[in-house]
Amino acid sequence: MVAVAVGWQVYALTNSALHLGMIGLAQFLPTALLTFHGGHAADRFDRKRVVQLCQWGEAAAAAVLALGTLEGWLTVTHIYLAAAVFGVTTAFERPAGAAMLPNVVPDRLLQQGTALSSGAMQFATISGPALGGLIYAYAPVALSFVTKSDPTLRSVIDAYGPGATYATTAAFWLLAGLLNGLTPVARHVGLTTSPTWRSLFAGVGFVWRNPMILGTISLDLFAVLLGGATALLPIFAADVLHTGPVGLGLLRSAPALGALAVTVMLARRPLQSRVGLRMFQAVIIFGCATIVFGLSTELWLSLIALVVMGAGDEVSVVIRLSLVQLKTPDDMRGRVSAVNFLFVNASNQLGEFESGVVAALIGAVPAVLVGGAGSVLIALLWMKLFPSLRNVERLV
């Protein structure tokens, strides 16, 4: 929701694509610089409280954005500062939240818990921007109707869209922090030492020394890095499938729908055997579906391919996250989750960049085909390089 409001408001204030890009930079830099500190904090302090404080910090930043918008003093600089706050809180919240999951559900239910958690994120990814856009667009209309379009209130009415969106976001974050505080969480034995360079980067060393975890995290990094077809959806919608904004919206929603279907299935019927092999098969299916999408010239076939891509990726995500948590000691989960988050975050952003660069050089369709084939080859290569990962039988 806040991404929609910030994007529209900054563009309305500046009419500049550069400023839109700067928002992402303002949020990314603190996240990248502080993620390892966030992992250390997750292993040293009460993870539930870390998540709760981060969410309340995000609520405070959103409330400032709402107040500044409604009172008319908000500038682009204030929005940059708020984006930086979101980046800082993300760096601490994501590792603590990931490490907290095994303290909430028992190991035997971790696969289902991971599926439900991932499904909730997919649902938020779909519904959040839609809800934010509706509030942004129709809140001023509602206020205008109530005030009968009083000209003296025009500036307030115009500001009510982003202001109401920020205020709603702040309320959701406050509620999230409250619910996290009420969640029963098993205590973990926290670190007692202050952060040092060695302890901050202990997660990197742990991942490097454990081929199973290294293979799991790096498989996701390279597969997503090569298979970033979603960044090129506007090109395919306009030039290949010859559809409009509605078609583009369907294309963007299709992977999340496939992912949601898989989370429901895995929450009810978890994988019982050969989970390592299933993860590799899911990545191969993801790559093959990417190739089908690249070759398709029909909207219906492209939608099916994207649904399959989302489903394959989600199977890999659930197995990967469950494996990383189960194979990591509790006192290291925060720092290992920080490494995992950094890899995933980098693969998503660099994957979109890679797709754009390759598409600019050889065209959108060849870029998607190369990416899909690359994902399949990476999966096959990793099966050979990490046999211990391929041979994982159960998530226990």
Image (tube, grey):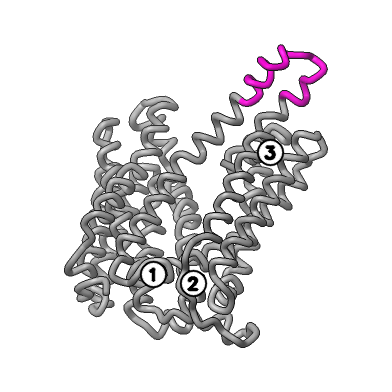
Mark drawn on residue 339: 2
Name the kind of residue labelled 3 in the image: Val
Tell me the magenta residue range: 139-157
Whether tag 2 and tag 1 are in contact, CB under 8 A, the answer is: yes
Q: Quadrant of residue 250?
A: top left
- Dot 1 surroundings within 10 Å: few (below 14), some, or many (20 or more)? many
Name the kind of residue labelled 2 in the image: Val
Marks 1/3: CA distance? 35 Å
Mark drawn on residue 162: none
Q: Tell me if residue 147 comes above or below residue 187 in the rendering.
A: above
Give coordinates of residue 79: x percent, y percent.
72, 46
Marks 2/3: CA distance? 32 Å
Q: Residue at image x 59%, y 66%?
A: 49
Q: Earlier in the sequence, mark 2 or mark 1?
A: 1
Q: 82 and 70: which one is in front? A: 70
Left or right: 342 in relation to 300: right
Left or right: 14 in relation to 265: right
Q: How many marks?
A: 3
Give coordinates of residue 388: x percent, y percent.
25, 79
Circle 1 SS class: helix
Q: Is 270 part of what is drawn in magenta?
A: no
Q: 356 and 218: which one is in front? A: 218
Give coordinates of residue 232: x percent, y percent.
42, 42
Q: Earlier in the sequence, mark 2 or mark 3?
A: 3
- Dot 2 surroundings within 10 Å: few (below 14), some, or many (20 or more)? many
Circle 2 SS class: helix
Q: Residue at image x 61%, y 73%?
A: 37
Left or right: 210 in relation to 75: left
Q: Earlier in the sequence, mark 1 or mark 3?
A: 3
Mark drawn on residue 217: 1
